[in-house]
Amino acid sequence: MQIIATRLAGLLRAEDTVARMGGDEFTILLPSLEQAQDAAVVAQKLLQSITAPILLDGQELYVSASIGISVFPFDGRDGQTLLRNADVAMYRAKDQGRNGYLLYTEAMNSTAFERLFLESSLRKALEQGEFMLNYQPQIEAESGHIIGVEALIRWRHPEIGIISPAKFIPLAEETGLIIPLGEWVLREACRQAALWQAQGHRLIMSINLSARQFEDRELVPKIRSILSEAALDPAWVELEMTEGAIIHNTDRAVQILRELRALGLRLCVDDFGTGYSSLSYLRRFPLDVLKVDRSFVQDVTEDSAGQAIVRAVIDLAHALRLKVIAEGVETEAQRECLVALGCDAMQGFLFSPPVSIEKLEAILDAARTSAPA
C-alpha cells in the first residue's frame, strides 16, 4: 500500500491531492483540468505505474487497479455527489474486467441501485429460506449410468423471481456473504446426499467451493462437522474448486487439500484449461478429478485444435491417475467424440439440465427400470 501510494503521489502535480480513504481505496482530486479527457489520460498513466512489478522481499508482485472518474460540474456540484458517482464508475470498471478506468455516466446509476438492492436482499435471503439447490446429473461415459450429481444454487426472490447465480455469486464473493451461503450449500447438499444414499441411490455429490471459502481457516472443521451432522460417508462427496482458488498460495493450498483428502473427500479442479493450467500444481496437489471446461467441449467436433486440447487433457489426467469429467455436453456428436477420446464422465443438457429434487428423483427412478439412454 505504501509503495502504491508513493507511485500515485509521484505522478501528480503539486496542486493535486491523493488520499487513502480506507482499505485499498484511494481518492484523487485533480483541479484545473481543461477537459474531462485529461482525467482519462491521467488515469491511464496511473494504471501503467500501478501495474509495474513491485519487488518485495526478493519476490516480484503484480497489482492491478480499477478507476472511476467523475467530473465537475457535469457529474455533481458538490464533493459528496462527485465521490459517490466516481465510486459507482469504479465498481462498473471492476465489473467489466478490472485494471481499467471508466468515466461516470447517468446510466450507471441504475446498475448501482440494482447492486444495492441485490446486496440488501441477499443479506436477508438466507434467513428467509429463499435459496434452493438444483442438481445436474453426471453420466458415466461408457455405460450411460448416472454416477453423480452437481449441486447448483438458485435464488428464488419473492418479488423478482429467479435470479441468476451469475448475478448474485460475484456479489456474495465481494461482500463476504459467500461464506455463510457456501456453508448452507454444503450442509443442504450433504443432507440430501445422505437421504438419497438411504433410498438406495448411490450418487457422488459434487459441491462447488468458492475462492473465499477456500481461504476460510475454519473450512476443514466446518466440513467435518457437516459430514458428521448428515451421517454421510465422505467418500460420496466431491468438492469442486477453480484453478484460481487454489493456485495463489500453493503451499497453503496443498495443506488444505491434504486435510480435506484426509477427511475422505474427493477433490476436483473445475473449468480446467481456462485459468493457469499449471502442470506443476497437478503434480503437487492431491486431486482426483479434472473437469474440462465447456468452451473446449463445444469445439471438440468442429475444431481439430480444440479436439487436440481435450485429448491432451484426458491423456495427462489419466497419466496422473485422475478421472476426467466433461461439462457442457449438448450434442450426440460431442458425446461420441468424448467417449472415443477416453473421457470418464460427462454432464450437460444432452442428458439433463439442472433440475429440482423431485425431477431428479423421477429421472433416477426411471433409470432403475430401463436401460440407460
Image (cartoon, rainbow, N blue to C red):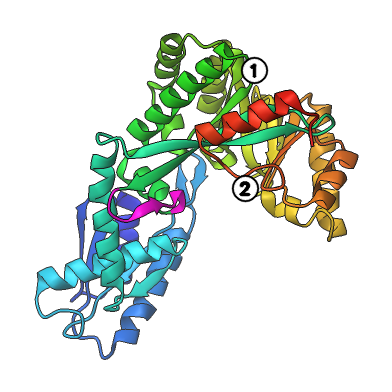
Q: Could you say which is closer to the camera, residue 186 or residue 253?
A: 186
* Residue at image location 14% in from the left, 72% down from the top: 81
In this view, 116 is above or below 39: above
Q: Nearer the viewer, mark 1 or mark 2?
A: 1
Q: Position of residue 96 (x, y in %)?
A: 44, 64
Distance CA(mark 1)–CA(mark 2): 32 Å
> Is disc 2 placed on a helix, strand or loop?
loop
Q: What residue do we see at 65% from left, 42% from top?
A: 352
- Quadrant (top left/top right/bottom left/bottom right) for the C terminus: top right
The residue where tag 2 is placed is: 275
Is 251 contained in the magenta span? Answer: no
Q: Position of residue 222 (x, y in %)?
A: 39, 18
For the point 53% across and 27% down, the residue is 253
Q: Is residue 208 above or below residue 100?
A: above
Can residue 241 be seen in the rendering of this structure? yes
Residue 9 in sight: no
Q: Is residue 133 left or right of residue 5?
A: right
| Residue furthest left in the image | 78
Which residue is at 11% across, 80% downward? Answer: 77
Q: Is residue 170 shown left or right of residue 176? A: right
Q: Residue furthest front?
A: 369
Q: Secondary structure at mark 1?
A: loop
Instruction: Judge whether 206 appears above or below 93 on screen.
Output: above
**What's the amino acid at mark 2?**
Gly
Quadrant in the picture for residue 264: top right
Q: Residues within 10 Å of mark 1 (few under 14, many from 20)?
A: some
Binning the other alpha carbons within 10 Å of mark 2 as few (below 14), some (14 to 19) or many (20 upward) gives: few
The quarter of the displayed image where residue 139 is located: top right
- What amino acid is at disc 1? Arg
Which segment is the magenta one?
158-166
Residue tagged 1: 202
Residue 21 marker:
none
